[in-house]
Amino acid sequence: MSLSQPTDAELNVMIRARLASIGIDLEQLPAGSAPDPDTGSPGRDSVLASLRGFMRTTVLPLSSYTFAADARLAQQAAPPKLYPSIDVVREAR
């Protein structure tokens, strides 16, 4: 089953939720796409448009990437743990 591209509204919801989860509130930016003349802060609409473009051109293509049948690349699908336990190494021997 192939996934369809998300709409702008769906991406806006995801972007706002992700930013809110790390403490960033887009409502603090000026409304519209014009930057604030006093602070130079970008407009809310231009920030969302930029982040939607990033999601479509970078994140979505990366998430749909699959490794070829080449066994040397397939091992990358399950990389080893960063810091395996000493006991796990001893049990494997």
Image (cartoon, helix red, strand yellow):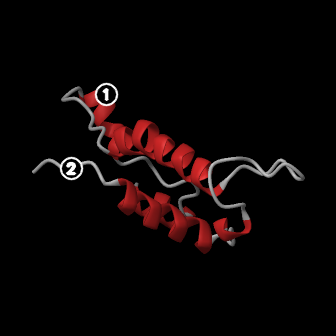
The residue at which mark 1 appears reads as 72
Is 47 in front, or is 71?
47
x and y percentages locating residue 38 in the rendered image: 90, 52
Q: Alpha carbon of mark 1 to alpha carbon of mark 2: how far? A: 30 Å
Kind of element beneath mark 2: loop
- Estimate how packed mark 2 is, as few (under 14), some (14 to 19) or many (20 or more) residues with alpha carbons within 10 Å: few
- Residue type indicated by callout 1: Arg
Residue 32: image x %, image y %? 62, 55
Place residue 18 in its image quadrant.
bottom right
Q: Is residue 62 above or below residue 5?
A: above
Query: Residue 19: x and y, percent?
Result: 60, 65
Helix, strand or loop under label 1: helix
Residue at (72% x, 49% y) in the render = 42
Name the residue tied to disc 2: 4
Name which residue type carries label 2.
Answer: Ser
Residue 71 to residue 13: above or below: above
Query: What residue is rendered at 27% in x and 34% in y?
Result: 67
- Residue name at image x 25 percent, y 30 percent: 71
